[in-house]
Image (cartoon, rainbow, N blue to C red):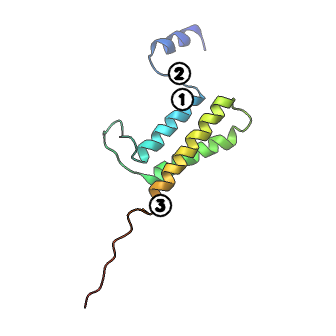
Amino acid sequence: MGEEGKRESKGSGSLKLDFSNFVLSLNASALIHLGDIPDPQSRERLVDLPAAKHTIEILEIIKSKTVGNLDGEEQKLLDDVLFNLRMKYVKDVSPQKNNPPPYTYDVR
């Protein structure tokens, strides 16, 4: 990249795109799909479990394709993000144990 590109990116005010920011961006997307944080455009908390699962799978692919190529901090971030997203996803798709389904009785 030439000097112009470097100066332009410094003045743009956007975040530096590196591996950690990329992982955190995917994490935020998954959290939006899980309904944990509101969608930045609609400001609503919508749950889209297939999209959340898809984003988690993307992170799993990234993990498998980067084995041996990440520094310790990047590896820990990826492992932590994946662990936390998997736990949230499993919790969201599991039946509620504290709220058993209501029973109906046939009174004749």
* Residue 47 position in % (x across, y down): 39, 51
Q: Nearer the viewer, mark 1 or mark 3?
A: 3
Label 1–label 3 contact, CB within 8 A: no
Read off the residue under disc 2: 16
Q: Which mark is residue 36?
A: none
User: What amino acid is at disc 3?
Assistant: Ser
**Quadrant of the rendering where the C terminus is positioned:** bottom left
User: What amino acid is at disc 1?
Assistant: Asn
80 or 58: nearer the eye? 80
Quick one: SS at disc 1?
Answer: helix
User: What amino acid is at disc 2?
Assistant: Lys
Neighbourhood count class around disc 1 (C-alpha, 10 Å): few under 14, some 14–19, many 20 upward: few
Res. 3 image quadrant: top right
Neighbourhood count class around disc 3 (C-alpha, 10 Å): few under 14, some 14–19, many 20 upward: few
Disc 1 from disc 3: Cα separation: 30 Å
Name the side, left or right, on which 65 lies relative to 81: right
Q: Earlier in the sequence, mark 2 or mark 1?
A: 2
Label 2–label 1 contact, CB within 8 A: yes
Q: Residue furthest bottom?
A: 108
Label 2–label 3 contact, CB within 8 A: no
Read off the residue under disc 3: 94
Disc 2 from disc 1: Cα separation: 8 Å
Neighbourhood count class around disc 2 (C-alpha, 10 Å): few under 14, some 14–19, many 20 upward: few
Disc 2 from disc 3: Cα separation: 37 Å
Read off the residue under disc 1: 21
* Residue 10 position in % (x across, y down): 50, 13
Above or below: residue 15 compared with residue 91: above
* Residue 41 position in % (x across, y down): 33, 36
65 or 94: nearer the eye? 94
**Quadrant of the rendering where the N terminus is positioned:** top right
